[in-house]
Image (cartoon, helix red, strand yellow):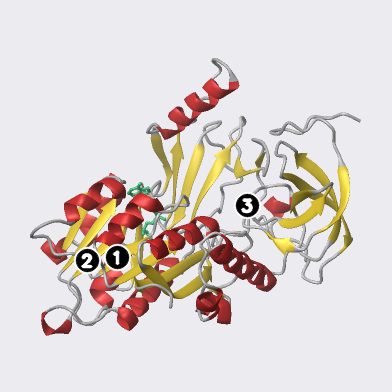
């Protein structure tokens, strides 16, 4: 039988029997077949499965999907997510007991910290990540998400996108908090649009529709892909179809007004938990430096609307003289300006690429940072930003990452720039998925 698998160059459907033995960063389990590494989606380390090859483009590794479980792991369960059961990409680890999924996420993090970050094993072994594993955030493993995006099909039905392909699945996912998607399945929206849905701290549910991005039909595949990327990056027409254009989020005593289409942490407990962690690291490792023993200057890089700036301002004994928030998103910085209005000159916002804006925060007559918090997107911060942060010689760096491999790479770059890890904590901020959030604290020095 010859069949083309969508999105790959595999022409022959091939099935292999394989035993998988370790977890991969993308949520797959890794085995070997035909002398190659095989990344198997839908399998759990220790299982023997029949896997169907879905991508054979690479010489060193292939991708596959488990289609039959011959020897099931004791940690296998039936997914609680009706959307994932129908093929949606949302809860990709829903078939693994969530407590064991956290063990697998810990194992992935420990592995990439050594292999990609080249951190010393004895240093990693003393961190909370190694000794107590990946922490569960407050609440259950379902009903944690307060912000989501939904796709809309040609008939106007909203739902999750299938893992592979553009099919829209209108069964509900179990991640959103209760009530967040009430009535959405019964409604019809603009065909091929995208919905931004938020349930805010007041309990107000808002939906903004983003106009469809029409796909390019011109030129060869490469040209079309390039043009489609450009089209996706352009601003899209937005229409509020439910609730308000702005969501109100509260953390501690502060309130933020964030556009429904803007960034806010997806897990309802994340801003408070991450903020508490940043403050705890700062209290533990920040030497008293300013007059009266208070630290003076903080940088909140990739700071969005300033959740970590607020945590440090309000949580550090003696507070801060100044905190600089740097972000490329004008709407996030507008929100920060409103939230920190009463703080006056103590909070300064800088719009642009972090790599470009750091020069404004250093130099003669400008007080350098005592503490720098970096919370980059999935791609990480990279060598240029990390080199500039290290050159500013903060006493403490707190680095946050939502992609294990990029996080590990960035910690390795910090080590090359003279900063060593003193603590790493990880959070299961995306239960039922392979994603994990990690927070590291670094101080000047080399591992000795
Ligand atoms: C993971 S979010 C963190 C936001 C914030 N720390 C929070 O917890 O709400 C990453 C932020 O980085 C911003 N961003 C992405 N790439 C950037 C870049 N190259 N330079 C500056 N900001 C960037 C995004 O606008 C977004 O606000």
Pair 1/3: label in front: 1
Q: Which residue does the numbered mark 2 point to in the structure image?
A: 369
User: Badges 2 and 1: C-beta atoms under 8 Å apart?
Assistant: yes
CA neighbours of label 2 inside 10 A, class few (<14), some (14 to 19), many (20+): many
For the residues labelled 2 and 1, the Cα–Cα distance comes to: 7 Å
| Residue 110 x/y as whole percent | 58, 69
For the residues labelled 3 and 2, the Cα–Cα distance comes to: 39 Å
Q: Which residue does the numbered mark 3 point to in the structure image?
A: 90
User: Badges 3 and 2: C-beta atoms under 8 Å apart?
Assistant: no
Left or right: where does residue 432 sit relative to residue 205?
right
Secondary structure under tag 3 reads loop
Secondary structure under tag 1 reads strand
Q: Which residue does the numbered mark 1 point to in the structure image?
A: 372
Secondary structure under tag 2 reads loop
- Please tell me whether residue 66 is drawn above or below residue 226 in the rendered image: below
Q: Residue at x 61, y 44 (%)?
A: 159
- Please tell me whether residue 195 is drawn above or below residue 224 in the rendered image: below
Between 365 and 136, the residue placed more toward the observer is 365
Left or right: where does residue 255 sit relative to residue 224?
left
| Residue 270 x/y as whole percent | 45, 67
Query: Is label 2 within 8 A of ligand 1 (CB to nearest ligand atom)?
Result: no
């Amino acid at each position: 039988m010859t069949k083309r698998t969508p999105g790959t160059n595999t022409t022959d459907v091939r099935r292999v029997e394989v035993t998988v033995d370790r977890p991969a960063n993308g949520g797959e389990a890794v085995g070997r077949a035909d002398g190659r590494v095989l990344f198997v989606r839908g399998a759990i380390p220790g299982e023997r499965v029949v896997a169907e090859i879905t991508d054979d483009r690479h010489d060193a590794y292939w991708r596959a999907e488990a289609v039959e479980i011959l020897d099931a792991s004791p940690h296998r369960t039936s997914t609680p997510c009706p959307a994932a059961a129908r093929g949606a990409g949302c809860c990709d680890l829903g078939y693994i007991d969530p407590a064991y999924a956290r063990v697998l996420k810990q194992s992935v993090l420990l592995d990439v910290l050594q292999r990609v970050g080249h951190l010393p094993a004895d240093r990693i072994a003393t961190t909370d990540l190694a000794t107590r594993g990946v922490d569960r955030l407050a609440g259950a493993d379902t009903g944690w998400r307060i912000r989501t995006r939904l796709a809309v099909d040609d008939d106007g039905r909203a739902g999750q996108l299938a893992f592979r392909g553009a099919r829209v699945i209108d069964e509900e996912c179990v991640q959103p908090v209760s009530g967040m998607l009430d009535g959405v399945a019964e409604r019809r929206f603009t065909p091929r649009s995208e919905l931004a849905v938020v349930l805010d701290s007041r309990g107000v549910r808002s939906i903004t529709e983003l106009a469809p991005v029409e796909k390019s039909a011109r030129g060869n595949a490469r040209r079309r892909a390039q043009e489609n990327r450009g089209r996706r990056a352009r601003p899209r027409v937005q229409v509020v179809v439910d609730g308000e254009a702005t969501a109100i989020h509260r953390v501690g005593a502060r309130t933020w007004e964030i556009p429904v289409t803007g960034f806010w942490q997806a897990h309802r407990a994340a801003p408070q938990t991450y903020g508490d962690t940043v403050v705890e690291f700062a209290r533990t490792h920040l030497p008293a430096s300013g007059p009266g023993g208070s630290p003076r200057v903080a940088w909140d890089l990739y700071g969005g609307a300033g959740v970590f700036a607020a945590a440090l301002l309000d949580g550090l004994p003696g507070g801060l003289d100044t905190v600089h928030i740097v972000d490329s998103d004008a709407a996030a910085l507008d929100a920060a300006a409103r939230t920190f209005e009463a703080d006056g000159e103590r909070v300064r916002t800088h719009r642009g690429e972090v790599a470009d804006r750091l020069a404004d925060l250093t130099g003669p007559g400008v007080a350098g940072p005592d503490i720098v918090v970096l919370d980059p997107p999935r791609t990480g911060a990279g060598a240029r930003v990390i080199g500039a942060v290290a050159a500013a010689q903060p006493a403490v760096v707190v680095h946050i990452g939502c992609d294990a491999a990029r996080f590990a790479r960035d910690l390795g770059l910090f080590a090359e720039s003279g900063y060593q890890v003193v603590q790493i904590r990880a959070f299961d901020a995306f239960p039922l998925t392979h994603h994990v959030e990690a927070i590291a604290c670094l101080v000047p020095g080399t591992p000795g």
